[in-house]
Image (cartoon, rainbow, N blue to C red):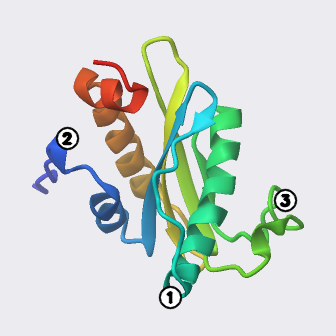
Amino acid sequence: MQRRKKAAPLHLINTHTISKTLTTTGAFIFLFHRNEVENTAPAPTPAQKHDQIMRDQAFSLACHVREIGRLLAIDDLYAHPLVRRQEILSGHCMTAFIGAPVRCETAQVLAVVCAIDAKARKWNSCDISRLERIVAQIESCPVWLSKICGTR
């Protein structure tokens, strides 16, 4: 009998945990509040330019996730019709993307949790299930949601 891995305690859900859970190059949580994007990151140094490009590319796809309101998994950006001809490939640093919306009680998308990989990969049902469990954990915690919304 295979033991099911316990979910991480909610206070430990962060981009490192998400990336480790999905075995990816990186992960992001983009916050959308009142149709504005929360951007608290300082301007990148030249050494951080690669990371900033990756973040910008992931953000562009997170906006698509927010727009469509459901999980988006892209195995290979070069082959996907949504982004194949768009600017996202300029200075590319990632090739695979998976993201899912975080909703409040009113079904408004408050955030997008996403993971990226530098190489093309097939997102399998296990990857999708793991990401959906992370999102469900966030959505089930009023404290976390109030932090996203900026309310108490």
| Residue 64 place in picture, x, y as percent | 70, 44
Q: Residue at x 61, y 34 (%)?
A: 36
Quadrant of the rendered image containing residue 87: bottom right
Q: Which mark is residue 81?
A: 3
**Residue named by callout 2:** 10
Which image quadrant is residue 1 in? bottom left
Q: Amino acid at mark 1?
A: Ala
Q: Residue at x 30, y 64 (%)?
A: 16
Q: Report, in whole angstroms, how far the alpha carbon at label 2 lies from the one at label 1.
A: 32 Å
Q: Amino acid at mark 2?
A: Leu
**Above or below 30: residue 115:** below
Residue at horizontal 50%, vertical 88%?
47
Decide which of tag 3 and tag 2 comes sooner along the chain: 2
**Cα distance, mark 1 to mark 3?**
32 Å
Q: Amino acid at mark 3?
A: Pro
First in sequence, mark 1 or 3: give its number.
1
Q: Quadrant location of the C terminus?
A: top left
Of badges 1 and 3, the one in the foreground is: 1
Q: State yes or no: discs 2 and 1 in contact (Cβ < 8 Å).
A: no
In depth, the one of 86 and 41 nearer the eye is 41
Q: Is there CB contact under 8 Å for labels 1 and 3?
A: no
- Where is residue 100? Give x, y as percent: 52, 43
Tell which circle, 2 or 1, labels the residue nearer the N-terminal end: 2
For numbered disc 3, what is the local secondary structure?
Answer: loop
For marks 2 and 1, give the one nearer the viewer: 1
Residue 94 screen position, x and y as percent: 61, 75
Dot 2 alpha-carbon crowd within 10 angstroms: few under 14, some 14 to 19, many 20 or more = some
Foreground tag (3 vs 2): 2
Q: Determine whether the residue tagged by mark 2 lies in a helix, strand or loop.
A: helix
- Give the numbered dot on residue 47: 1
Is disc 3 surrounded by few (<14), some (14 to 19) or many (20+) residues within 10 Å? few
